[in-house]
Amino acid sequence: MSVVAIDGPSGVGKSSTAKEVARRLGYAYLDTGAMYRAMAWLALSRGVTDPVDVLEQVRGADLEISTDPDEFSVSVDGIDVTEEIRSAEVSENVQTVSSVPDARAELIERQREIIAAATPGIVVEGRDITTVVAPDAPVRILMTARDDVRVARRAKEVHGSADAEAVAATANLVTGRDAKDAATTSFLTAAEGVFTLDTSDLNFEQVVGTVLDLVKDAE
């Protein structure tokens, strides 16, 4: 079983790249960020903010996440929250869960179980995959891009445009989230043995091709 671990901040193209690589290799796909988002959605819906309550919630939740790159879905206690977890409110409150060390440990354990069960391989993307979740993965990549490129990409994704107004509305969402996440995870600098892939001046096919080449080289 082979594991491709991809880290990186918002707007570098982690999700789209990871899904496409998984498709081409016939691998499973895991969006670890969606697991934190799902738990943040649950915390918001229940009005939970205290770390002890957050941990209890994570431990008790029936969290189901698809590993099919073509049929992605997330459910919590039988409720489909695939669309809801992408809301701005959830994005702004992910740290309610990710900043609680024991809650992170609980979700990381679940992620490792999913990885261990995947055949013939899995592409895993998130914030601390190459260093914490799957540090022994044969292929470990840190995807990066210039701030202006990342903000423009996310603006187009969220607002359908990368004009000045859309960029201004998106800038804090991207850089602010990174700043918050950087307090609890290390995803802005590549650890030893991790390949840095700067996507600033590459098109999608070039990025996917680079990852596939790294997988081939590791075989």
Image (cartoon, rainbow, N blue to C red):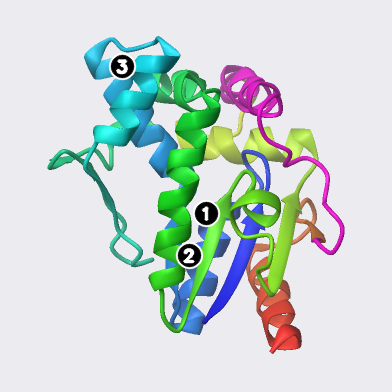
Whichever of callouts 2 and 3 sits on the residue coming sooner in the sequence is 2
Q: Position of residue 111 (x, y in %)?
A: 45, 54
In screen coordinates, is 48 left or right of 130? left
Q: Would you say the residues marked 2 and 3 are in contact, meaning their CB atoms lie under 8 Å apart?
A: no
**Residue found at x 72% / y 42%:** 187
Per the model, the C-alpha gap separating discs 2 and 3 is 28 Å
Above or below, comparing residue 80 to residue 60 in the picture = below
Mark 2 burial class by Cα count in 10 Å: few <14, some 14-19, many 20+: many
Q: Position of residue 18 (x, y in %)?
A: 54, 63
Per the model, the C-alpha gap separating discs 1 and 2 is 6 Å
Report the span colored magenta.
Answer: 165-194
To which residue does mark 3 refer? 44
Q: Position of residue 125 (x, y in %)?
A: 56, 55
To which residue does mark 2 refer? 19
Above or below, comparing residue 163 to residue 208 in the picture = above
To which residue does mark 1 refer? 15
Q: Would you say the residues marked 1 and 2 are in contact, meaning their CB atoms lie under 8 Å apart?
A: yes
